[in-house]
Image (cartoon, helix red, strand yellow):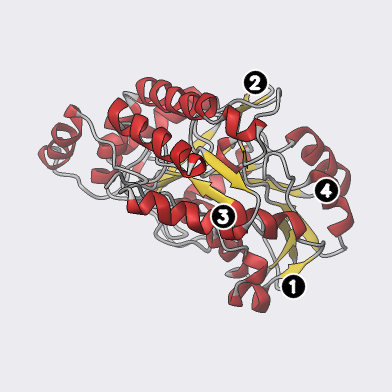
Amino acid sequence: MINFNVATYTDKTTEYILDVFNEKHASGDGKYTKKVHDWFKKNLDCKQALLVHSGTAALEMAAILANLQPGDEVIMPSYTFCSTANAFVLQGAVPVFVDIRPDTLNIDETKIEAAITSKTKAIVPVHYAGVACEMGTIMDIAKRHNLLVIEDAAQAFDSFYKGKPLGTIGDMGCFSFHETKNIMSGEGGLFVTNNEKLAERAEIIREKGTNRSKFFRGQVDKYTWVDKGSSYLPSDVVAAYLYSVLEISDKIQAKRISVWQKYYNAFETLETQGYIRRPVIPESCTNNGHMFYLLFNDLETRTKFIAYLKENNIYAPFHYIPLHSAPAGETYCKTASAMNITNKISDTLVRLPMFYDITDEQLEKIIKTVLNFWRR
């Protein structure tokens, strides 16, 4: 079976993990956490980069930092993972869903303004498949309405909008290092911001609401509980794994983009014949090779396609069930626009296997099997 995803690790992974125990410090904020922080501060050119135990944790920190009150509203797409909404629901806020664009499958920036009310406090663009939302328009809307912008950049490692790294354009950015992501540590995430006030408070929230980090830097003579927060620190073992993968991030990105391009070229004829649609990358955006998907014309064909690939030992899953139609979405959230595109995409999208160690033989088999499905 060719899996959809396979975990990445390097020759250094075990060495670094064992070194954590040699350092006799396996809890959070150890030697490798500091290395990860320095790597991201340099490569994202941001004031604060904090390693957390998941992308979900990063979103929860952002929701706390937004100072939301019960009943406040946060605008986001429905075509996303539940963590995007859950983080704000936990603070008593109401996610407000708007439809997505048919080209990039990102939030439709032209529908955001109509969803804004006196209760709106933030916009949460989700960079689907690592392709940037239309951040220029979104930032302009946020500025005019005095709203926060919290980027869900879970899939957007090493991706850019008009030359700016995704996750650093809004007030806060949230990344994921889950095993399905380009850069992984099994589980893991990152919170980033360029706002100095948010940066200082984020450090406190991450440390269970204490000023513990200031204590270890010698800035206070004792630490205590000063704000709300939770335990968002990962073990330094997780950081060691992540750092070993970051060291080969250039190779990983080159390989994933190469695989993405081979898929894209191989299925051009299918698109020309009207069988499928390939991903769209606007000129203002970059492709980070996170995901390659095909869009079918209807649910029935997609179902047959997934089954055919499974018969040929290839696992190619669909993606999100829209949050607006989920039981919790109906309970805790609001829908501000028709969801025609969201519903259509949910029924017709298939993701093809994409991972660093995929072989030429596996890739050839996947491409051949996809083409054979239509030749039948």
Q: Name which residue lies at 31% across and 32% down.
A: 358
SS of the residue under disc 1: loop
Residue 33, quarter of picture = top left
Amino acid type, label 1:
Gly
Report the mark closest to the observer, 1 or 2: 2
Question: Marks 1 and 4: in contact by CB < 8 Å?
Answer: no
Q: Counting residues from the N terminus, which is met first, the one under dot 4 or under dot 2? A: 4
Rounded to the nearest angstrom, the CA distance separating label 3 from label 2 is 38 Å
Report the mark closest to the observer, 3 or 1: 3
> Residue 146 has which mark?
4
Residue 283, position in %: x, y? 70, 22
Q: Which residue is mark 1?
A: 71
Of 320 and 197, nearer the camera is 320
Residue 261, position in %: x, y? 50, 24
> Residue 356 has which mark?
none
Question: Marks 2 and 1: in contact by CB < 8 Å?
Answer: no
Classify 10 Å Cα crowding around label 1: few (below 14), some (14-19), many (20 and above): some
SS of the residue under disc 2: loop
Report the mark closest to the observer, 3 or 2: 3
Residue 40, quarter of picture = top left
Q: Which residue is mark 2?
A: 163
Residue 258, position in %: x, y? 44, 22
Q: Counting residues from the N terminus, which is met first, the one under dot 4 or under dot 1? A: 1
Q: Which residue is mark 3?
A: 301
Q: Counting residues from the N terminus, which is met first, the one under dot 3 or under dot 1? A: 1
Classify 10 Å Cα crowding around label 2: few (below 14), some (14-19), many (20 and above): few
Amino acid type, label 3:
Thr
Q: Is residue 270 above or below residue 262?
A: below
